[in-house]
Amino acid sequence: MRRRILSLAAFACLYLMTYGLSRASEAGPVWLALSETGPAYLEAAQALRAELEHTHPAKIEWRTGHWSEFEKSAAEPRAVVAIGTAAQRGMQELFANAITPPPLLVVLVPRLVFERHADPIRLRAGTMSAVFLDQHPARQIELIRQALPKARRIGVLVGTDWKDHTAGLAGAAKERGMELVISRVESAGIFTALQSLLADVDVLLALPDPEIFNGQTAGNILTAAYRRQVPLIGFSPAYVKAGALLALYSTPSQIGTRGGELLRQALAGKPWPPPQWPQEFSVRINQDVARSLGLALDEQRLHEQLRRMVRP
């Protein structure tokens, strides 16, 4: 009888320890810090939550708001999701002096911008990851090959920070019998570099560098490319609407869903995966521009071809 009582006591102790550890691992909210409260950021946040709630219904306490609303004095989060560049910077600064900062997942940011601001110590420690806004280089080059089979020289305008970020594009182009022509914007300015580049390429690939492609420059770049009859490949549907031939992009919902998949793995105790390109993507074509260039393009066909041939 005494042995049975001891066994039950040991079992109860083990149960309480295990239950306590389990509850401790689930303690604390998940923060969703938004760079802005605009539709794109809210869409990404909603998609990320929906992905988690498929498998963790009512088990996660969420805190969602503008990044400036969060304070370190609040309940320690299990994890932090920064949506956009401003939120990435804000959340890193908030926990900059923490001995053990909570894991940080960044979504909806270009790779260049993420790496410009990412804490290298946290990256090496595996407590920081990202789902980029831009696309895998092979996917971008393959889209050009499929849509413009006669194109051989692909032009890109880059700032100084892109020096180490064009190798993937150049390699993907070379594998497909194409050449990446890089024009760096120097003190002479964007449009001097652009005019020289347009005279020497078959297609212009826009990269999500806010110093080069922004609200003040995009329209003039598109106009200059169109006048030269050089098709421009954009990185958002807004470029197609403004006059780009086509765009390859991932929607905020697609990026948020992928972020939710990574967060679910981390909350299950698995190591954070490395920063990565989005898996799901969309293709948009400006049919008016395509017709003016004598091209017959189909969005669905291009999308299916890319899904079959390129899997980052």
Image (cartoon, rainbow, N blue to C red):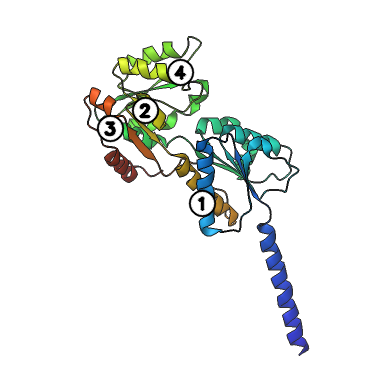
Q: Which residue is mark 1?
A: 50
Q: Could you tell me which secondary element the residue under label 3 belongs to?
A: helix
Give the number of the disc on residue 147.
3
For marks 2 and 1, the one nearer the N-term is: 1
- Work out how far the residue at label 3 is from the one at label 4, CA to CA, in angstroms: 25 Å
For marks 3 and 2, the one nearer the N-term is: 3
- Work out how far the residue at label 4 is from the one at label 2, CA to CA, in angstroms: 15 Å
Residue under the point 71% across and 45% down: 100
The quadrant in which residue 45 appears is top right
Amino acid, disc 1:
Ala
Nearer to me, 189 or 99:
189
Q: Is residue 67 left or right of residue 145?
A: right
Identify whether 145 is placed above or below 12: above
For marks 1 and 4, the one nearer the N-term is: 1
Is label 1 in contact with label 4 (beta carbons under 8 Å)?
Answer: no
Q: Is residue 132 left or right of residue 248?
A: right
